[in-house]
């Protein structure tokens, strides 16, 4: 493709640069992979049956654990046991045994198919203290009691005492106004300048309009024919309109294309950033207007990032995840400076663009490049790829600007979710750290006691690993909080209780179609406190679906994009409750009445004064002058040509089969983004088996 950066040597992936696929070993050995047939039962073994889902292990047999969540396993030393577990939610799980120090004694490989079973046979010994699912160790964690009934303490199995507050404080109550539905998996939302329409991106490849009066319109554009097979977290992921869209009709998409012919062997697909141009009346897209800016080969189907945003500087910011894979290691992951962990794209800035936020100038070119590099990008003239703006991310799914600040929500691995306030040249820690906590690729079930707080002096002069402004665990005191953070914006809309709050959310509380919306109070001195929003009229005040995205229109109002569950694939505007609206109306009425009375009194006094001085009264009208916001750098607009052909709405040429399993997910890539992994089934319109995004 013309302008495809893969033709440049620095974007070509050399197999010698990357670690090969590896299997992590521990004190024990891999066992029982892929089904019961791989772990032959012995006549002397005792069987334990469990169900596995992100919310926790579910006891099934023997009767003493039936129905319990993360039940204690009472074992006798020297006795052989056979644990048989079923994958309930179609997410990536395994079964691992730990000692009291958190070291792995035995583990199985990752199982990702819903309904599939796996078995591990072992002989109980005194050292065994806990059992976990390594990708979701924050919520899937239980105690093992050997012989005398003594047990290691398991924080996630502890119930919150009666009378104590929830692990997340309750915040304001809001209402949701559904403005459009009928989507599969709405992944992004945008309101272009100079246009009263809003645009919604759907994972299977469509861009829909939402008219000012509400309701989903016909597809504005369809790129389904350009997409790779809709499995994992692949699909149409992001959209951004040029700041001068009302003049130049340019907009940008991020989508997952089939693997390029010159990509490294064994890779999954190619993530494309492309520019398109709408017709002069913006009713469609000019046929043949696609201009590919970036084509980045991805080693797995997961952790693609996909968010796009124009900053106040006029440059385009683009997010890329670390490429997926277990613990950010394996095929397609570069070596880095932190020797305690096995490589990781988040800490690498020289070999590829993964695990980073990029910043490019889409209004300029450099040589044969279809874009230019801003002069003040942090790695200009230094070792590293010049497109990089910030790095150290796992899967920056959603991001956006508020008050000139860039907020990036980075989906966590086993335990923690985070929101980062991103600065130029910032390193946000993955995979040295998960949030503010140390992380080990060798033993993800255990948090290391210490790890670096900065890179070595030889690596960019010892840059600090920056803490997030928001962090939360997947569960606390046995109560789930969330599994995959969804970024948002500082609120400036019609819900007064949210004014000035950073509104964000989580895809699901425990793997089921029940997401959350949160509001955080910005704080310049440390991490931000946040509260959980209550949804008026909803069962238990909960969000009845997976939360996929938080969108914003040009008036500052926010929208929750959901999929599955009671809410289905829809766009919901955050609005005041009826009670709050009534209160606001009464307040406005009283204010207007008082203002009218004051005006009449003033007018009477003025008239009497004028009459007394034999001067006719004059009414003076004062108009408040608004100060126009000045954009730091104005970008040139490219004028569309007069001869335009409208692109057809549904091009399917060259597409791969979209029929996939909705249960497919990452191999030990943590809860996020199994989000799109199972939503791919929803998104693969033919499959309709969706269970998670």
Image (tube, grey):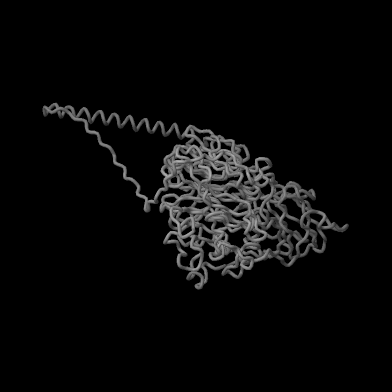
User: In the rendered view of the protein, which quadrant contains the N terminus?
Assistant: bottom right
In which quarter of the view is residue 196 placed? top left
In the current view of this chain or complex, which residue is farthest to the right? 43
Please tell me which residue is depicted at 31% across the width and 31% down the height of the picture. Answer: 594
Q: In the displayed structure, does residue 674 sit left or right of residue 210?
A: right
In the current view of this chain or complex, which residue is farthest to the bottom? 458
Q: In the displayed structure, does residue 413 sit left or right of residue 373?
A: right
Task: Pinpoint residue 67: horizontal percent, then vertical percent.
Answer: 74, 46
For residue 297, say whether it is visible.
yes
In the current view of this chain or complex, which residue is farthest to the front? 643
Q: How many marks?
A: 0
For residue 354, say whether it is visible.
no
Task: Pinpoint residue 656: horizontal percent, then vertical percent.
Answer: 66, 47
- Name the residue nearer the viewer: 421 or 192: 192
Q: In the displayed structure, does residue 492 sit left or right of residue 450?
A: left
In which quarter of the view is residue 218 placed? top right
Q: In the displayed structure, does residue 317 sit left or right of residue 235?
A: left
Please tell me which residue is depicted at 62% across the width and 42% down the height of the picture. Answer: 652
Task: Pinpoint residue 389: horizontal percent, then vertical percent.
Answer: 48, 59
Task: Pinpoint residue 158: horizontal percent, then vertical percent.
Answer: 65, 53
């Amino acid at each position: 493709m013309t302008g495809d950066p893969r033709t440049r040597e620095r974007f070509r992936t050399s197999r010698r640069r990357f670690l090969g696929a590896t299997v992590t070993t521990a004190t024990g050995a891999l066992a029982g992979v892929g089904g019961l047939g791989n772990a032959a039962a012995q006549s002397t073994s005792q069987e334990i049956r469990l169900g596995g889902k992100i919310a926790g292990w579910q006891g099934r047999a023997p009767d003493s654990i039936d129905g319990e969540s993360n039940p204690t396993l009472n074992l006798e030393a020297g006795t052989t046991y056979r644990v048989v577990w079923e994958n309930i939610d179609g997410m990536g799980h395994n079964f691992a045994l730990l000692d009291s120090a958190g070291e792995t004694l035995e583990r199985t490989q990752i199982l990702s198919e819903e309904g599939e079973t796996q078995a591990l046979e072992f002989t109980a010994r005194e050292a065994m203290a806990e059992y976990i699912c390594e990708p979701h160790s924050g919520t899937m964690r239980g105690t093992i009691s050997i012989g005398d009934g003594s047990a290691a303490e398991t924080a996630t199995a502890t119930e919150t005492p009666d009378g104590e507050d929830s692990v997340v404080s309750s915040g304001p109550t809001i209402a949701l106004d559904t403005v459009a539905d009928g989507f599969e998996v709405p992944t992004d939302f945008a309101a272009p300048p100079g246009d009263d329409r809003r645009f919604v991106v759907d994972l299977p490849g469509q861009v829909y309009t939402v008219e000012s009066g509400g309701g989903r319109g016909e597809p504005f554009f369809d790129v389904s024919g350009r997409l790779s097979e809709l499995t994992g977290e692949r699909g149409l992921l992001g959209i951004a309109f040029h700041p001068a869209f009302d003049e130049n009709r340019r907009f940008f998409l991020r989508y997952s294309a089939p693997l390029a012919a010159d990509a490294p062997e064994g890779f999954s697909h190619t993530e494309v950033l492309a520019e398109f141009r709408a017709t002069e009346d913006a009713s469609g897209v000019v046929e043949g207007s696609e201009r590919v800016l970036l084509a980045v080969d991805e080693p797995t189907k997961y952790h693609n990032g996909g968010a796009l945003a124009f900053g106040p500087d006029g440059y385009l910011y683009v997010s890329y995840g670390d490429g997926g894979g277990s613990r950010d290691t394996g095929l397609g992951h570069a070596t880095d400076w932190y020797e305690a962990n096995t490589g990781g794209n988040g800490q690498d800035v020289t070999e590829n663009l993964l695990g980073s936020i990029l910043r490019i100038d889409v209004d300029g070119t450099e040589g044969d490049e279809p874009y230019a590099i801003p002069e003040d990008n942090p790695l200009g003239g230094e070792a590293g790829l010049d497109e990089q703006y910030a790095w150290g991310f796992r899967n920056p799914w959603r991001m956006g600007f508020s008050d000139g600040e860039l907020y990036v929500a980075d989906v966590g691995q086993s335990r923690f979710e985070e929101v980062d306030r991103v600065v130029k040249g910032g390193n946000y820690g993955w995979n040295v750290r998960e949030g503010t906590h140390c992380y080990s690729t060798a033993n993800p079930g255990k948090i290391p006691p210490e790890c670096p707080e900065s890179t070595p002096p030889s690596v960019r002069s010892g840059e600090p690993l920056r803490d997030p402004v928001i962090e939360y665990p997947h569960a606390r005191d046995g109560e789930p909080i969330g599994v995959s953070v969804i970024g948002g914006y500082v609120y400036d809309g019609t819900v007064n209780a949210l004014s000035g709050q950073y509104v964000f959310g989580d895809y699901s509380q425990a793997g089921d179609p029940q997401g959350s919306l949160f509001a955080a109070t910005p704080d310049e001195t440390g991490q931000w406190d946040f509260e959980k929003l209550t949804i008026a009229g909803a069962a238990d005040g909960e969000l009845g679906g997976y939360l996929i995205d938080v969108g914003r229109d040009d008036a500052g109002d926010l929208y929750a994009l959901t999929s599955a569950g009671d809410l289905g694939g829809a766009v919901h505007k955050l609005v005041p409750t009826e009670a709050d609206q009534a209160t606001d109306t009464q307040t406005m009425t009283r204010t207007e009445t008082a203002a009218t009375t004051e005006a009449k009194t003033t007018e009477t006094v003025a008239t009497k004064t004028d009459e007394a001085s034999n001067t006719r009264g004059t009414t003076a009208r004062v108009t408040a002058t608004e100060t126009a916001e000045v954009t730091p750098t104005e970008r040139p607009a490219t004028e569309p040509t007069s001869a335009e052909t409208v692109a057809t709405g549904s091009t399917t040429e060259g597409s791969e089969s979209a029929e996939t399993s909705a249960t497919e997910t990452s191999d030990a890539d943590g809860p996020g983004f199994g989000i799109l992994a199972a939503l791919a089934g929803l998104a693969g319109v033919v499959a309709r088996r969706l269970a998670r995004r």
